[in-house]
């Protein structure tokens, strides 16, 4: 059974101005998040990612549709019941949202106090969490004395205090530099592996999805336009709007503006070859071009690694007779994806 099951969930906000149109922040979203998933949600700014997370956390009610957490329908539950359910859901934020007047230990103890734990129970639990996130020596520090990465570790420890089954991370690494981002992502991986916590990561960064997510949903205009296995969604997006979004985040695909520059700089036909793990080898492709007597030059490209599986895009400028080029490209296209710039 899914841990979180969204069915036809819509969230609308009243029009910002009188006479204006209401905002459909989340539009008819149906999505299952299975126990143990690290589910990435990616999309342009304003796509509805944060709103979706607030609905899952029952911070706001959906306008329509059904949201089940662990088999229980959230819609219509009284606040008292929702508060109990929220204990089973941890959340971390871009700005960390720590209490600046509390120590690190005090921040982590806070949700335990709210949940009614005694002092004698709280102390060992806080020590255990500090150890897990590698901050045992910072128990008495205040948030302002910590680096961004350390603050987010405290945020993670606090979110895990009550042993939630689900952790929601909304742009949790967006305020961090790339190296610190990787450290925090490694910690989240351990949270998932060692405690079996299901994680939903909201991000607009491909790197985050690539290094941690097992599944991904692409959102655009409130809708989930594509979802599934991370490798499949990013290597072969199915519909044109997810293709457009994916092209902005994957490595190696030239944008229309970049293609125009390539065409100006290089003679010959500009052709992009897209490889996936398990496709014909690149050597075969190059061999085929050489055999046809074509001169070619690699002018743009990149390889994406998603948890050990690679896909990439190589753009070539090919010079030679048109008929020979057509024949070679047709034969290559039987094995890998070939796109010629118009
Ligand atoms: N409380 C609110 N009242 C009115 N409109 C809102 C509210 N919250 C969000 N919206 C609108 O809903 C849409 C989706 O916003 P949301 O914050 O969910 O996007 P997002 O995908 O998280 O974007 P970002 O990547 O910039 O964080 C936007 O058009 C936003 O202006
Ligand atoms: Mg957001």
Image (tube, helix red, strand yellow):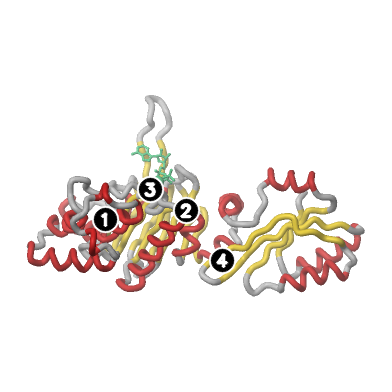
Calculate the distance from the C-alpha at mark 1 to the C-alpha at mark 2.
Answer: 24 Å
Q: Are marks 4 and 3 in contact (CB under 8 Å)?
A: no
Work out whether mark 1 precedes mark 2 in sequence or the reverse, and give the earlier one: 2
Is label 1 in contact with label 3 (beta carbons under 8 Å)? no
In front of the other: 333 or 312: 312
| Secondary structure at numbered mark 4 | strand
Provide residue 163's location: percent of width, then percent of height. 23, 66
Q: Does any atom of ligand 2 lie closer than 8 Å to the CB of label 3? A: yes
Q: Could you tell me if the residues under marks 3 and 2 are in contact, i.e. CB atoms within 8 Å?
A: no
Mark linked to residue 42? 2
Per the rendering, the mark at residue 74 is 1
* Disc nearest the viewer among 4 and 2: 4
* Quadrant of the drawing holding the N terminus: bottom left
**Does 235 sit left or right of 287 as displayed?**
left
- Please tell me which of labels 1 and 3 falls first in the chain: 3
Name the image quarter holding residue 5. bottom left
Mark 3 nearby-residue class (10 Å; few <14, some 14–19, many ≥20):
some
Q: Residue at x 88, y 67 (%)?
A: 292
| Residue 66 pos. (x, y %) | 33, 55
Q: Which label sits in the foreground, 1 or 3?
A: 3
Sequence order check, earlier mark of 3 and 2: 2
Mark 2 Cα within 10 Å, few/some/many (few <14, many 20+)? Answer: many
Closer to us: mark 1 or mark 2?
A: 2
Mark nearer the viewer, 1 or 4:
4
């Amino acid at each position: 059974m899914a841990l979180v099951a969204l069915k036809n969930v819509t969230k609308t906000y009243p029009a910002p101005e009188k006479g204006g149109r209401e905002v459909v922040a989340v539009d008819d979203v149906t999505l299952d998040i299975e126990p143990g998933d690290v589910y990435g949600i990616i999309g342009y700014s304003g796509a509805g990612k944060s709103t979706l997370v607030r609905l899952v956390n029952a911070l706001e009610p959906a306008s329509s549709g059904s949201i089940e957490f662990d088999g229980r329908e959230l819609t219509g539950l009284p606040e008292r019941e929702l508060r109990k359910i929220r204990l089973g859901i941890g959340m971390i934020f871009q700005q960390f949202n720590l209490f600046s007047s509390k120590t690190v230990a005090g921040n982590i103890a806070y949700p335990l106090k709210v949940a009614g734990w005694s002092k004698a129970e709280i102390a060992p639990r806080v020590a255990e969490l500090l150890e897990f996130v590698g901050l045992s020596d910072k128990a008495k520090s205040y948030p302002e004395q910590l680096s961004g990465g350390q603050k987010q570790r405290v945020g993670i420890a606090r979110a895990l205090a009550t042993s939630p089954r689900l952790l929601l991370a909304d742009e949790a690494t967006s305020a961090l530099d790339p190296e610190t981002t990787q450290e925090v992502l490694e910690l989240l991986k351990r949270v998932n592996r060692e405690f079996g916590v299901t994680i939903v990561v909201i991000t607009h960064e491909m790197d985050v999805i690539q290094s941690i997510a097992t599944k991904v949903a692409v959102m655009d205009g409130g809708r989930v336009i594509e979802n599934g296995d991370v490798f499949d969604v990013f290597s072969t997006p199915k519909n044109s709007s997810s293709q457009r979004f994916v092209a902005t985040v994957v490595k190696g695909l030239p944008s229309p503006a970049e293609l125009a520059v390539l065409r100006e700089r290089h003679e010959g036909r500009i052709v992009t070859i897209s490889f996936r793990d398990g496709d014909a080898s690149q050597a075969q492709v190059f061999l085929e071009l050489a055999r046809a007597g074509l001169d070619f030059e690699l002018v743009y490209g990149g390889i994406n690694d998603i948890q050990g599986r690679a896909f990439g895009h190589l753009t070539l400028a090919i010079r030679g007779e048109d008929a020979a080029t057509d024949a070679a490209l047709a034969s290559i296209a039987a094995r890998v994806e070939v796109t010629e710039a118009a």
